[in-house]
Image: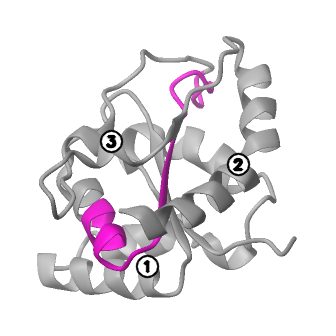
């Protein structure tokens, strides 16, 4: 199976370390990951330029993977990324990353489902249609292995599911 090009959505300031662990698993196309410097450069731009950048990134991808930390839900740009992926009929999946350790070796508490804050055209919450993955393991290394083992299938399932919402 060819590696998919995906767009990773996450709260940069709090979850960059956790997100980089998932982004660097080697399970998706290398074209899916852009450098942290790219994001630093983008976030200095106007809202219109950020929207343009998000849209151009999503157009190249088959799926958006929302990496869900403690405070990911209902953030302006994460909501926008999810909305755009929905409008473009991309696969959408969420993966909880709160149990991965950060750069200081700390885990955090589970955050709210970000798909509860974005709505389908029929006004249902997207959480009714979009699956999230939350590892049953508690230690960071086991959670990492669990995500690594499941991420490719989660992405494929999300792409298949996109036809139904």
Q: Which dot, 3 or 1, sits closer to the camera? A: 3
Work out which quarter of the rendered image holds the C terminus and state it. Answer: bottom left
Report whether 24 appears left or right of 32: right
Q: Is residue 45 above or below residue 72?
A: below
Residue highlighted by disc 3: 127
Expressed as whole percent of the image width and height from the top left, the position of residue 40 reads: 39, 67
Q: Is residue 140 above or below residue 77?
A: above
Depth check: give the residue in front, 30 or 3: 3
Residue at the spot x=44%, y=86% of the render? Answer: 59
Classed neighbour count for the residue bearing mark 3: other residues with Cα under 10 Å, few (<14), some (14–19), many (≥20): some
- Indicate the colouring scheme: one colour
Expressed as whole percent of the image width and height from the top left, the position of residue 99 reads: 58, 21
Depth check: give the residue in front, 165 or 85: 165
Depth check: give the residue in front, 17 or 76: 76
Instruction: Provide the secondary structure element on which disc 3 rests.
Output: helix
Expressed as whole percent of the image width and height from the top left, the position of residue 55 reads: 33, 83
Q: Which residues are magenta?
A: 81-104
Quarter occupied by residue 32:
bottom right
Residue 58 is labelled as 1
Classed neighbour count for the residue bearing mark 2: other residues with Cα under 10 Å, few (<14), some (14–19), many (≥20): some
């Amino acid at each position: 199976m060819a590696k998919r090009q995906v767009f990773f959505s996450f709260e940069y300031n709090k979850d960059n370390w956790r997100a980089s662990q998932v982004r660097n698993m080697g399970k998706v196309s290398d074209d899916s990951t852009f450098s942290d410097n790219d994001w630093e450069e983008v976030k200095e731009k106007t809202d219109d330029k950020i929207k343009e950048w998000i849209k151009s990134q999503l157009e190249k991808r088959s799926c958006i993977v929302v990496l869900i930390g403690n405070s990911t839900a209902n953030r302006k740009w994460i909501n926008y990324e999810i909305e755009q992926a929905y409008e473009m009929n991309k696969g959408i999946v969420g993966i909880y990353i709160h149990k991965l350790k950060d750069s200081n070796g700390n885990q955090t508490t589970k955050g709210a489902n970000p798909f509860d804050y974005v709505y389908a055209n029929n006004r249902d919450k997207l959480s009714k249609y979009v699956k999230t993955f939350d590892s049953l393991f508690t230690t960071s290394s086991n959670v990492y292995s669990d995500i690594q083992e499941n991420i490719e299938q989660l992405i494929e399932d999300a792409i298949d599911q996109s036809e139904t919402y």
